[in-house]
Amino acid sequence: MPRTTTVVIGAGHCGLAISRCLAERSIDHVVLERGEVANSWRTQRWDSFRLLTPNWMTRLPGFSYAGDDPGGYQTAPELVRLIGEYAKTTGAPVRANTTVESVSPQENGFLVRTDQDVWEARTVVIASGAHNLPRLPPVAEALPDGLFALSALDYRAPGQLPDGGVLVVGASSSGIQIAHEVHRSGRPVTLAVGEHVRMPRTYRGRDILWWMDASGVFDERYDEVPDLVRARNLPSMQLTGSAATLDLATLSRLGVRLAGKLAGVRDGRAQFSGSLPNVCALADLKLGRLLDTFDAWAADTGFTDCGPVARFPATTLPEKPPLTVDLGEIRSVVWATGFRPDLSWLDVPVLDRKGRITHDGGVTTWPGLYLIGMPFLRRRRSSLIDGAAADARDLTAHLAGHLA
């Protein structure tokens, strides 16, 4: 039976970041990956997908983007190549095509069973990601038989969908991009909108994420926010991997029909909440507060290499958003309602009643078991590739202390 000090589960950017930090401390380890390196980027992104973060934000321990397009946005295949090269240059001890079947505690550590072998390890780092399975609302079960439906994880291109109307449920980053793309394919699109985070691509002449990075918003720590549970469950920012802003007003102008949150299905009709104006007003208000933060930072630091202070108009909506839609108009549904991790293999008692791992900034309640790659794990930037380095260093330091 092979033994090692640390088993890292997952060879995406987070697993490789942890591997690099472990190697720097001479902690022997292995990285187990069910597919190839960067498996989720290979298999769970639609064809036209691009990163929401500009290239200059593609930073990992010992690596930063040095190409000739720092303001561009990488495609999934480009990112797969980059992460693959990172794995090679760091010498990460990856065991590809090795599926973890169970992790269970034992004396002085853990037993990690895979479809290839069984490992003994003193510590385990879960880096398998937060986007393994779609999170579908209960109303999904009410769809009539024969209506084609798939999740954003399974969506690849409009050609997958039958001709006719499409209902996209969810208006965060995936939902607005899919709705836009499907609409451009010539299919009528209805977009069901719930709580969302409105975000322009640029502000005062700079990328919005530049402002969040420079002003320190991304560095806000998990132990500094008043409502951490809510912060970790906020929808993703309404951004696309391009220089253009794509928001609800833009989609509406293009001809996408906006409706409120999908509330139910009854008598052959989809029912929508009447709260669309309210959720949009709240998103507008939060955007204004964020821009105030940027402006205050610029004023306090004397930063002037940007455009003038500006604000965006309120989200324009149709006068009477539909409360019901005849499902006879809808031929397919795309669920862009979020994702959840797959922890079916974890046999350590660290899950709460909702199946979420109980942890303190990635340090679980079971000594020696760690978690990385979840939203707002330790910082607001934790869900980004750019957040893996700082989180990995913190967790590796704690892991080393545990071993000592």
Image: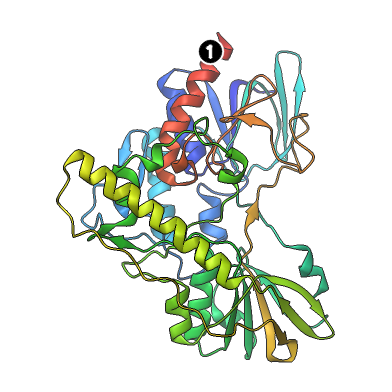
| Callout 1 amino acid | Gly
Which residue is at 68% across, 32% downward?
358
196 and 402: which is toward the camera: 196
Task: Give the SS element for disc 1.
Answer: helix
Q: Residue furthest top?
A: 404
Pointer 1 residue: 401
236 and 309: which is toward the camera: 309
Is 241 situated above or below 31?
A: below
Decide if residue 57 is in sight here.
no
Q: Position of residue 182 (x, y in %)?
A: 53, 81
Place residue 139 in its image quadrant: bottom right
Is 179 situated above or below 35?
A: below
Q: Position of residue 246 (x, y in %)?
A: 41, 71
Place residue 356 in its image quadrant: top right
Decide if residue 365 is in sight here.
yes
Is 121 situated above or below 51?
A: above
Q: Quadrant of the C terminus?
A: top right
Q: Position of residue 52 (x, y in %)?
A: 41, 58
Is 250 situated above or below 28?
A: below
Q: Position of residue 205 (x, y in %)?
A: 22, 61
Q: Quadrant of the N terminus?
A: top right
Left or right, 68 with respect to 169, comes to left
